[in-house]
Image (tube, helix red, strand yellow):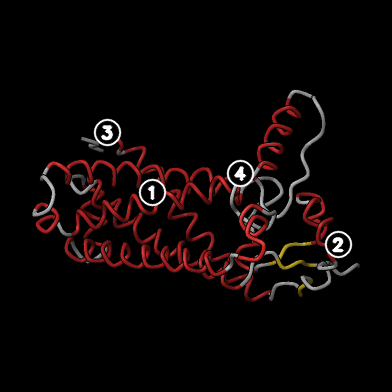
Amino acid sequence: MTEKTYIKRYSKIHRLFHIFIVLTFMNQAVTGFSFLFITTDLGEKLSRLLGGYKTTFFLHKVGGVLMISGFLIHILYLLSKIDRRNLKTSIFGPDSLVPNLQDIKNLSQRVLSFFGFGSLPKIDRWAYWEKFGYWGVFWGMPLLGITGVMLMFPLLICSVVPGWTLNVAALLHRAEAILAVSYLFIIHFFFGHFSLSKFPLNEAMFSGRVELEELMEERPAWVERLQKEGKIELLKAKAPNPWYRVLYFIFGYAALACGFYIIIKGIDYSRYIKLH
């Protein structure tokens, strides 16, 4: 049996950021879900399970502070990775998550291929749909953070701006939270873990590595570029430790189960959601 070759796709810092956002987002989703439906039996039971309304509110505030702090650290990390001697390639190159002209070409080529015109595009390190998901979450963070701070300190905010701004903040905070939960628990989970090539779990973000054979099929442009630059050998990695795989399968499916529960119950209780 031929031993599989693995390539390192995500660094430790990438995986650390991902685990951090998973934990803080799950905390915000569960505690926020409790607030959203606090007038129902479900919301009341969930609040009691978390230690009561005050404890739930405290957990939500702490989670929000941690999430925004992590976001600011992430921005500093991104700035530190910019090569000022080669600014254009550093920001818009194939290793960057900033959308570029090639993403538009790849999207156009994929759409045309759906109708039988041409073949599928050759994807590099980051696909256009991955960039879309990343920036969707990225731009949602300031909105949630700013409105969240306004709702945390209502008296202070009202001493500076009119009171009606809190109503707007509450509306935007709730709407963006529902959008984020819906996107991550439906779109991101489905395409990330339940597509035929990834089921039963996409291990890449947990282990940091992907089989070379899989990359050659899904990201041929990246593999070709690495081979051309002579970096393919430098990125080769060992197979994931079996015990480590057990741990992240448990963690991953616990997050999936929690997410699907929130979505199913959220749809069932959607008539209680007030967006005004």
Spot the residue most to the top: 115
Residue position for label 1 = 262
Q: Are marks 1 and 2 in contact (CB under 8 Å)?
A: no
Q: Please, is residue 243 above or below residue 120 in the view?
A: below
Residue located beneath label 3 in the image:
271
Q: Amino acid at mark 1?
A: Ile
Q: Secondary structure at mark 2?
A: helix
As drawn, 161 above or below 49: above
Distance in Å between CA atoms under marks 3 and 4: 32 Å
Which tag, 3 or 4, sits closer to the chain's start?
4
- Quadrant containing the C terminus is top left
Q: Nearer the viewer, residue 113 or 270?
A: 113
Which tag is nearer the camera, tag 1 or tag 2? 2
- Residue 160 screen position, x and y as percent: 12, 53
Tag 3–tag 4 contact (CB < 8 Å): no
Q: Which residue is mark 4?
A: 129
Mark 1, other Cα within 10 Å: few <14 / some 14–19 / many ≥20 = some
Q: Which residue is mark 2?
A: 227
Judging from the image, what secondary structure is the residue with disc 3 in? helix
Q: Is residue 95 left or right of residue 42?
A: right
